[in-house]
Image (spheres, rainbow, N blue to C red):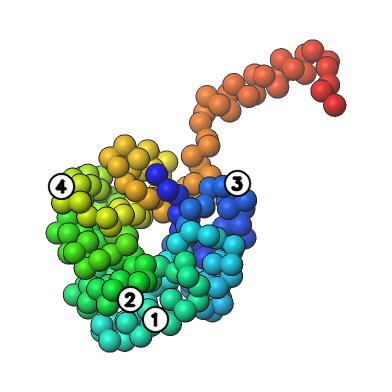
Amino acid sequence: MKFFVDTADVDAIRELNDLGMVDGVTTNPSLILKSGRDILEVTKEICSFVSGPVSAEVVALKADEMIAEGRKLAEIAPNIAVKVPLTWDGLKTCKVLSDEGHMVNVTLCFSANQALLAAKAGATFISPFIGRLDDINLDGMDLISDIRAIYDNYGFETQILAASIRTANHVTQCALVGADVMTAPPSVIKSLANHVLTEKGLDQFMKDWAKTGQKII
């Protein structure tokens, strides 16, 4: 499973990228706001050192305007994935941009039927939002599993990009049900290294090592 990092914080992306933990990046209007930077400027900087897909989202609501914005964003770098919402206008935009050879990430997916439409429109990625489904007492993993089955049934090449990942358990479950990609904030990706028994074991090793009175260097 590929790891995308969900942020527009350049320093956080660089740290994970240096460790080989970044296969791509996703941004959205909320993350651009949080960064406090111009969307074109910060996206260009991210693309300069991340070789994988970098999602940049349109903000228009009508297809003609979405297409124009998408083309503008795609000019930033060859690895831009234009991010569009799963609306009828978003699907129209997806079809046009994908036919032009651009990567398209269709976001805000909450049903298997929506995912089916996105695949037929030529989406490179479909982004089902797991955490937001959990918020309304629906199992986001059921959606990932349903999309996986549908795409496999018909040979769709659209990649399932599990989004709204909030916990380490979400990551494990996505990998088990066959998501192609997951995108998560830097804090969630870092949390994957944590385990209470690892910390307990390391603490005991350090105590025992101190008792030896030895040094390696």
**Could you tell which of marks 3 and 4 lies nearer the N-terminus?**
3
**Could you tell which of marks 1 and 2 lies nearer the N-terminus?**
1
For the residues labelled 1 and 2, say whether their Cβ atoms are less than 8 Å apart.
Answer: yes
Around disc 3, counting alpha carbons within 10 Å, would you say few (fewer than 14), some (14 to 19), or many (20 or more)? few
Q: Residue at x 83, y 21 (%)?
A: 215
Q: Mark 3 highlights which residue?
A: 19
Q: Nearer the viewer, residue 114 or 159?
A: 159
Left or right of residue 205: residue 5: left
Q: Mark 2 highlights which residue?
A: 100
Q: Which amino acid type is shown beneath numbered disc 1?
A: Arg
Q: Position of residue 27 (x, y in %)?
A: 44, 66
Around disc 1, counting alpha carbons within 10 Å, would you say few (fewer than 14), some (14 to 19), or many (20 or more)? some
Distance of mark 1 from mark 2, alpha carbons?
Answer: 10 Å
Quick one: quadrant of the C terminus? top right
Q: Residue at x 53, y 60 (%)?
A: 51
In this rendering, the label closer to the viewer, 1 or 2: 2
Q: Residue furthest top?
A: 212
Distance of mark 3 from mark 4, alpha carbons?
Answer: 36 Å
In this rendering, the label closer to the viewer, 2 or 3: 2
**Could you tell which of marks 2 and 4 lies nearer the N-terminus?**
2
Q: Mark 4 highlights which residue?
A: 153
SS for dot 2: loop
Q: Mark 1 highlights which residue?
A: 71
Q: Position of residue 83 (x, y in %)?
A: 36, 70
Q: Nearer the viewer, residue 167 or 98?
A: 98
Q: Which amino acid type is shown beneath numbered disc 3?
A: Leu
